[in-house]
Image: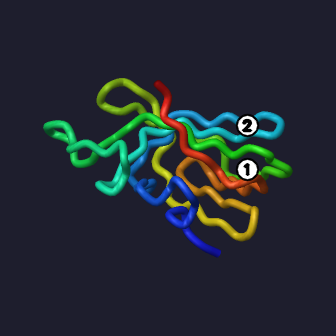
Amino acid sequence: MSDYWSILGFEGLYLEDSWVLDITARPGVLEFVVDLVLRESHPRYEAPKVGEQYCHRRGVLRFEGVSSLRWEGQGSVPATDATGEQDYGSVDALRVTDDVYTVEGDFGRIVVASAPPSVEFPG
């Protein structure tokens, strides 16, 4: 078992303070829309804005080639932040064992067998 920073493309992220805005599961695909915290080592990193602790960028964590998915502990009501945007909390953990990924947070626990996930930045 290893943690998310060992996944190609995830090494410059800090998921524990990144906010999950939406989760979509459909046949073969699982997507998380996230306000990602970027570490200084990430190529898209910029100094945090005034009054902010971290560099945030909107991104999508995408799991493709999903062959199985189990979502436990669903149903938490989203929180509303100071800007009025709803979120489902942060990603407390993302661990990988072979081709099985476990994602945990206030949104529950999702265990997904898939190809390695990717990180995409819209726009």
- Residue projecting furthest to the bottom: 1
Query: For mark 1, does the 10 Å Cα neighbourhood hold few (<14), some (14 to 19), or many (20 or more) residues?
Result: some
Q: Position of residue 16 (x, y in %)?
A: 43, 56
Q: Disc 1, disc 2: CB below 8 Å?
A: yes
Q: Amino acid at mark 2?
A: Ala
Count of numbered marks: 2
Residue under label 2: 25
Q: Quadrant of residue 116?
A: bottom right
Disc 1 to disc 2, how far (Cα)?
A: 10 Å
Q: Which of these two is toward me, 9 or 48?
A: 9
Q: Position of residue 36 (x, y in %)?
A: 42, 44
Residue 54 % position (x, y): 27, 47
Mark 1 or mark 2: whose residue is earlier in sequence? 2
Q: Is residue 106 left or right of residue 79?
A: right
Q: Name the side, left or right, on which 115 lies relative to 10.
A: right
- Residue 83, compared with residue 44, is above or below; it is above
Dot 2 alpha-carbon crowd within 10 angstroms: few under 14, some 14 to 19, many 20 or more? few
Residue found 62% across the figure and 37% down from its top: 23
Image height of 5 relative to 54, above or below: below
Image point 29% across, 54% down: which residue? 40
Q: Secondary structure at mark 1?
A: strand
Residue at image position (49%, 28%) is 122
The quarter of the picture where the N terminus appears is bottom right
Residue at image position (45%, 54%) is 15
Q: Which quadrant of the structure image shows residue 47?
A: top left
> Between 75 and 115, which is closer to the camera in this rendering?
115
Type of amino acid under label 1:
Trp
> Disc 1 designates what residue?
71
